[in-house]
Image (spheres, rainbow, N blue to C red):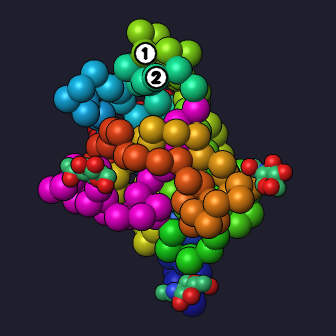
Amino acid sequence: MKSSFLVAALCAVVHTVLCAAPTNYTAVAVIDNGAGIKGTVTFYQADANSNTTVHAEITGLAQGDHGFHVHSLGDVTQGCNSTGEHYNPFNVTHGSIDSNPRHVGDLGNVVSPGPSQATVFQATNVYLPVTGQYSIVGRAIVLHAGQDDLGLGNSTLSKANGNSGARIACAVIGYAT
Ligand SMILES: *[C@@H]1O[C@H](CO)[C@@H](O)[C@H](O)[C@H]1NC(C)=O
Ligand SMILES: *[C@@H]1O[C@H](CO)[C@@H](O)[C@H](O)[C@H]1NC(C)=O
Ligand SMILES: *[C@@H]1O[C@H](CO)[C@@H](O)[C@H](O)[C@H]1NC(C)=O
Ligand SMILES: *[C@@H]1O[C@H](CO)[C@@H](O)[C@H](O)[C@H]1NC(C)=O
Ligand SMILES: *[C@@H]1O[C@H](CO)[C@@H](O)[C@H](O)[C@H]1NC(C)=O
């Protein structure tokens, strides 16, 4: 009786320590569209129940806003065209990075100062899992030619994908160290 209590107590402590240990699930995507748009996007999650930090640095983008999303597939057999639609496992309407609802893959826009300068994007506490059932690993990050209207526009595409136009660069998201 007493020893089984001790075992249970020990397990509870070990479990808590394991759960509390920072695991830092990390993923990366390396963009190179073969026509001057290059960059790196990193995603990390401190533990399985945390939200994700996203950091991107991209060069070669025309000045202005460019829609930025995780698409559902990591299939680049037809370039960015075969990466599917925005990753949307809960089948809701399109939004911004911090709206509710939003597609899990909705990251809004990156804002480029011009092609010769680095476009930097940083976001914290985003629901964009790197581990678990809704992980984005094996899917793709996609940059669009135009601005994502964040679901607020008049076009019929607005509520579906933000109407941000052609897919100009993309990369498959993989596990990182
Ligand atoms: C987690 O990984 C990110 C990206 O590699 C890094 O910037 C961050 O410092 C790491 N955090 C910890 C606690 O190791
Ligand atoms: C992707 O689709 C666009 C628009 O329909 C088209 O112009 C482009 O050639 C396609 N790219 C590939 C690699 O299939
Ligand atoms: C997703 O939602 C749309 C609109 O509400 C609905 O028409 C469609 O059947 C849903 N798809 C799935 C797979 O649930
Ligand atoms: C993660 O973000 C979602 C909104 O996208 C929020 O509802 C949730 O509370 C956040 N989780 C944590 C642990 O901050
Ligand atoms: C939507 O259409 C209305 C009426 O035509 C117009 O006033 C408004 O500026 C449009 N909004 C956007 C985001 O284009």
Describe residue 161's horizontal placement relative to residue 31 as left or right. right
Residue 152 position (above or below residue 120):
below
Nearest to N terminus: mark 1 or mark 2: 2
Q: Which residue is mark 1?
A: 115
Q: Residue 42 bears which disc, if any?
A: none
Point out the residue furthest to the left here: 77
| Residue 117 visible somewhere in the drawing | yes
Q: Which residue is mark 2?
A: 62
Residue located 43% across and 15% down the image: 115
Describe residue 35's horizontal placement relative to residue 26 as left or right. left
Q: Say which of 86 and 128 sits in front.
A: 86
Point out the residue furthest to the top here: 116
Quadrant of the image for the C terminus? top left
Residue 20 position (above or below residue 103):
above
Q: Residues within 10 Å of mark 2 (few under 14, many from 20)?
A: some
Discs 1, 2 touching: Cβ within 8 Å: yes
The kind of residue on which mark 1 rests is Pro
Residue located 44% across and 53% down the image: 70
SS for callout 2: loop
Q: Residues within 10 Å of mark 1 (few under 14, many from 20)?
A: some
Describe residue 25's horizontal placement relative to residue 175 as left or right. right
The kind of residue on which mark 2 rests is Ala
Q: Which residues are magenta?
A: 65-87
Mark count: 2
SS for callout 1: loop
Q: Find out if the beta carbon at label 1 lies less than 8 Å from the nearest ligand 2 atom.
A: no
| Residue 175 visible somewhere in the drawing | no
| Image coords of residue 125 (percent x, y) | 65, 46
Question: Is 83 included in the stretch rendered in magenta?
Answer: yes
